[in-house]
Amino acid sequence: MSDETTPICSAKGCRTAAVWVLAWNNPKLHTPERRKTWLACDEHREHLSQFLGVRGFLKDVVTLSEWESRPSEG
Ligand SMILES: [Zn+2]
């Protein structure tokens, strides 16, 4: 795998390869079926999950490989 295509953690300042996908939705901005995604490395998964969780935005946390194997919803 090339470094150029490796997904990187969404945490500020972090350049670690992401292994988790956090799927979230802000009901004030997005329709209910819409999913925004953040990527997270092992270290930042909990931090980012909490950030979204306390706001009630967090819908799902799955590994990157599982997320990519899911059928696209278009
Ligand atoms: Zn990170």
Image (cartoon, rainbow, N blue to C red):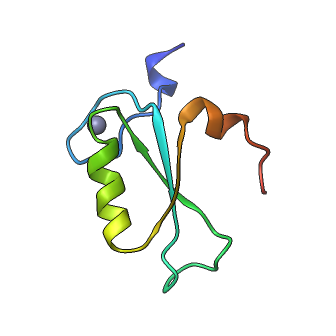
Image position, residue 64 (x, y; %): 55, 34
Point out the residue furthest to the bottom here: 28
The quarter of the image holding the C terminus is bottom right
The quarter of the image holding the N terminus is top right
Q: Nearer the viewer, residue 29 or 60?
A: 60
Q: Residue at x 20, y 42 (%)?
A: 13
> Quadrant of the rendered structure where residue 45 is?
top left
Q: Residue at x 61, y 29 (%)?
A: 65
Please indicate whether residue 27 sits to the left or right of residue 13 in the image.
right
Image position, residue 37 (x, y; %): 51, 54
Please indicate whether residue 47 sits to the left or right of residue 52 in the image.
left
Point out the residue furthest to the top here: 1
Quadrant of ligand 1: it is top left
Q: Nearer the viewer, residue 40 or 49?
A: 49
Residue 17 to residue 47: above or below: above
Q: Residue at x 47, y 26 (%)?
A: 6
Q: How many marks?
A: 0
> Quadrant of the rendered structure where residue 62 is?
top right
Image position, residue 34 (x, y; %): 64, 69
Image position, residue 28 (x, y; %): 48, 86
Residue 65 to residue 1: above or below: below
